[in-house]
Amino acid sequence: MKVREVMGVAAIAVRPEATFIEMVDAMRRFKVGALTVIDADDHPIGVVTDDDLLLKETDSGAHSGGVFDSRERRREHRKAAGGTARQIMTSPAITITKDTTVRDAARLMHRHRIKQLPVIDAVTGRIAGTVHQSDLLKIFVRPAEEIEREVITVCDRLAVDPGKVSVGVAAGAVTLSGQVAFRSQIARLVAAVREIDGVLDVENALTCRSDDLAPVPPFL
């Protein structure tokens, strides 16, 4: 599943000159936790989060720039002292395109501990929308019939007879039972089904007619 299937086409963005009050107002009005900062050509150049704005209240500025401050602490001091989006934003902006997979978008959010990502046009680089964590969760409520059809497609791709495989789907968990031709097909099929969007777990109850992984005794 691609980001284009779950993203929001409205992007809440501000210019670098936006003031602290304007950013607070935008977050409250549109009920978002982050704003994309865009340049004059609508290219994302940074992101301001609600945590960044809260530093204004929580950072006392005591010992700002002290020799014992960590790099992260000095960065927080600078953000707390800033008054515009340019001074407060984290840059560069982490972006994705409409053709980024939902799985890759989720990994980016997890790796960078962020809750939303600007979506850009792959050709122009201009902002085209936003994808939120809640948008990505849509893949885990896919209809069971839809997942079953995709499992059958995977069987065909791996030369497994789908007529010999029984597929059960419940709450994102897929149960595979039945019989395949070769033992080596079982591991490949289970691994491929795990990669299907919306699949949380796979229970393997497959058997095989022939064990092509059994060691062959040496000739004497």
Image: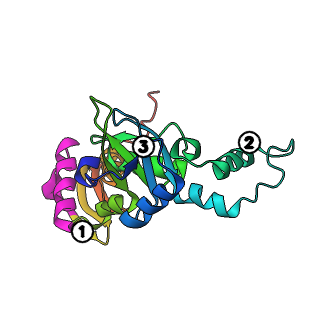
Q: Secondary structure at mark 3?
A: loop
Left or right position of 151 against 69: left
First in residue order: circle 1 vs circle 3: 3
Residue range corresponding to the magenta coloring: 143-166
Q: Residue at x 22, y 55 (%)?
A: 151
Position of 166 relative to 47 (above/below): below
Q: Name the mark nearer the viewer: 2 or 3.
A: 3
Q: Earlier in the sequence, mark 2 or mark 3?
A: 3
Extreme residue toward the bottom, this view? 170
Residue 73 x/y as whole percent:
74, 49
Q: Give the mark toward the camera: 1 or 3.
A: 3
Of 81 and 95, nearer the camera is: 81
The residue tagged 3 is 15
Query: Which residue position holds label 2?
Result: 71
Left or right, 102 with respect to 78, comes to left
Q: Are marks 1 and 2 in contact (CB under 8 Å)?
A: no
**Does 16 sit above or below residue 26?**
above
Q: Residue at x 28, y 29 (%)?
A: 124
Residue under the point 33% across and 45% down: 188
Q: Nearer the viewer, mark 1 or mark 2?
A: 2
Residue 54 counted in the magenta span:
no
Q: Quadrant of residue 143?
A: bottom left
Q: Position of residue 84 (x, y in %)?
A: 54, 47
- Quarter-of-image position of residue 25: bottom left
Q: Is residue 199 visible?
A: no
